[in-house]
C-alpha cells in the first residue's frame, strides 16, 4: 500500500506543477478568493515554504537522507507499522520525492498555493503532503504507537 501512496503523491504533485507552469506561469497569479487564496507561480530555491533560499545542495542532501531513512523504516517496520503509520510515512516520502524531482530537473521547486489571508509562504502539493504526513505520524507516535507496544507487552505476558 505504501508504494501506491508514494506513487500517487508524486503523480499528483508533478501534475499540479505541470499545470502550474503551463497555465499559471504566463499570468503570475489567479485569485480563487480575492485576498484570501490565490494560485501564484513561484520558483522556490529554498526549502519548504521558502526557508533558506539558494541552498539547493544542502536541501538535496538532507532530503535524500530523510527519504532514504523513512524508506528503510518502512521496509524494516513493515510488519509492525499500523496502516496509519505506513500511510503517513509514505505521504512524507512521496512529497519529498516530488520536490526532489523539481530540484534535480530545474534547480528550484515550483510552488503555487498562496494563502494570503494570513500572509503565509507560497507552497505546493508536495509540501502539503509532507506537512500532513508529519502531523499524522506525530499523532500516530504520540497516541497509538505507545499503546500498541503496551498492548503487545501485555499480550506477551
Image (cartoon, helix red, strand yellow):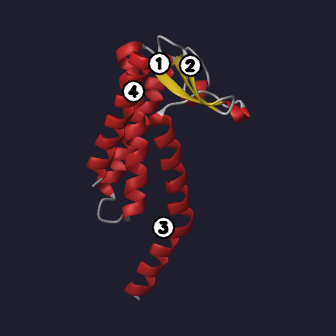
Percent from the top left, x then y, of residue 85? 42, 59
Q: CA distance from mark 4 to mark 1?
A: 21 Å
Residue found at x 50% / y 22%: 58
Q: CA distance from mark 4 to mark 2?
A: 24 Å
**Element class at badge 2:** strand
Residue identifier under label 3? 145
Total numbered labels placed on residues in the image: 4
Report the mark closest to the observer, 3 or 1: 1
Residue identifier under label 4? 100
The reply to whether callout 4 and callout 1 are in contact (CB within 8 Å) is no
The reply to whether callout 4 and callout 2 are in contact (CB within 8 Å) is no
Horizontal side of residue 117 vs 126, given as left or right: right
Residue identifier under label 2? 29
Q: Earlier in the sequence, mark 4 or mark 1?
A: 1
Residue identifier under label 1? 24
Q: Residues within 10 Å of mark 3 (few under 14, many from 20)?
A: some
Report the mark closest to the observer, 4 or 1: 1
**Where is the C terminus found, in terms of image quarters?**
bottom left
Amino acid at each position: 500500500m505504501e508504494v501506491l501512496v508514494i506513487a500517487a503523491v508524486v503523480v499528483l504533485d508533478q501534475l499540479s506543477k505541470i499545470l502550474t507552469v503551463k497555465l499559471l506561469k504566463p499570468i503570475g497569479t489567479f485569485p480563487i478568493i480575492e485576498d484570501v487564496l490565490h494560485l501564484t507561480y513561484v520558483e522556490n530555491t529554498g526549502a519548504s515554504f521558502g526557508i533558506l533560499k539558494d541552498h539547493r545542495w544542502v536541501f538535496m542532501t538532507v532530503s535524500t537522507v530523510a527519504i532514504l531513512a523513512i524508506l528503510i523504516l518502512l521496509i524494516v517496520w513493515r510488519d509492525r507499522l499500523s496502516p496509519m503509520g505506513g500511510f503517513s510515512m509514505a505521504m512524507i516520502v512521496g512529497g519529498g520525492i516530488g520536490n526532489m524531482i523539481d530540484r534535480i530537473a530545474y534547480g528550484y521547486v515550483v510552488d503555487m498555493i498562496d494563502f494570503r489571508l494570513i500572509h503565509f509562504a507560497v507552497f505546493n502539493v508536495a509540501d502539503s503532503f509532507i506537512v500532513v504526513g508529519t502531523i499524522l505520524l506525530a499523532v500516530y507516535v504520540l497516541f497509538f504507537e505507545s499503546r500498541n507496544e503496551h498492548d503487545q507487552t501485555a499480550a506477551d505476558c
